[in-house]
Amino acid sequence: MQIVTALLAGLVFGLGLIVSGMTDPSKVIGFLDIAGKWNPSLAFVMGGAILVGVFAFRFAATRAQAILGAPMRLPAARHIDRRLILGGLAFGAGWGLAGYCPGPALASVVTGGSKPLIFTAAMLAGMAMFEIRERLSQSAAKQVA
């Protein structure tokens, strides 16, 4: 049941991205072009997402279990560290250069075209490199200890 729910949530999210036009990289780049022809439409999409998220996280914080019975695991980290800042900078640079972030890129893959496929392949490669680096770091730390 959790897989079906995850699939439905992903489909609704992807449909929302497509309907709002956020799968069009020119809209994202237009939003980031504050010195040129600024397009504020992404701000409204973000505002809607934040509004929904505020209520969803407040509701989730009052529960020990998700609606389908899985344990509720909300993010616990509250500090800003070097990794968060560097990751945010890398994410923002990729977003600004390509006009895609992970969700819209995956939604755009179904519409065809090589750009979303190339972006998605590069994103997956970057995620794999991170995982390999993390595992090597953990393995080295265990050997030292």
Image (tube, rainbow, N blue to C red):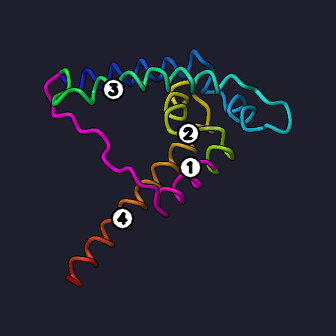
> Mark 4 and 3 residues: CB-CB less than 8 Å, in contact?
no
Bin the neighbour count of mark 1 within 10 Å (Cα to Cα): few under 14, some 14-19, many 20 and up.
Answer: some
**In this view, 51 is above or below 102:** above
The disc at residue 101 is 2
Which stretch did the figure color magenta? Answer: 68-92
Q: Quadrant of residue 30?
A: top right
Q: Nearer the viewer, mark 1 or mark 3?
A: 3
Bin the neighbour count of mark 2 within 10 Å (Cα to Cα): few under 14, some 14-19, many 20 and up.
Answer: many
Calculate the distance from the C-alpha at mark 2 to the C-alpha at mark 3: 26 Å
> Mark 2 and 1 residues: CB-CB less than 8 Å, in contact?
yes
Calculate the distance from the C-alpha at mark 4 to the C-alpha at mark 3: 35 Å
- Residue behind mark 3: 58
Calculate the distance from the C-alpha at mark 2 to the C-alpha at mark 4: 22 Å
User: Residue 90's x, y, as percent?
Assistant: 58, 55
Q: Nearer the viewer, mark 4 or mark 3?
A: 3
Query: At 58% across and 22% down in the image, what residue appears?
Result: 45
- Residue behind mark 1: 91
> Within the magenta stretch, is there residue 142?
no
> Within the magenta stretch, is there residue 90?
yes
User: Residue 13's x, y, as percent?
Assistant: 45, 22
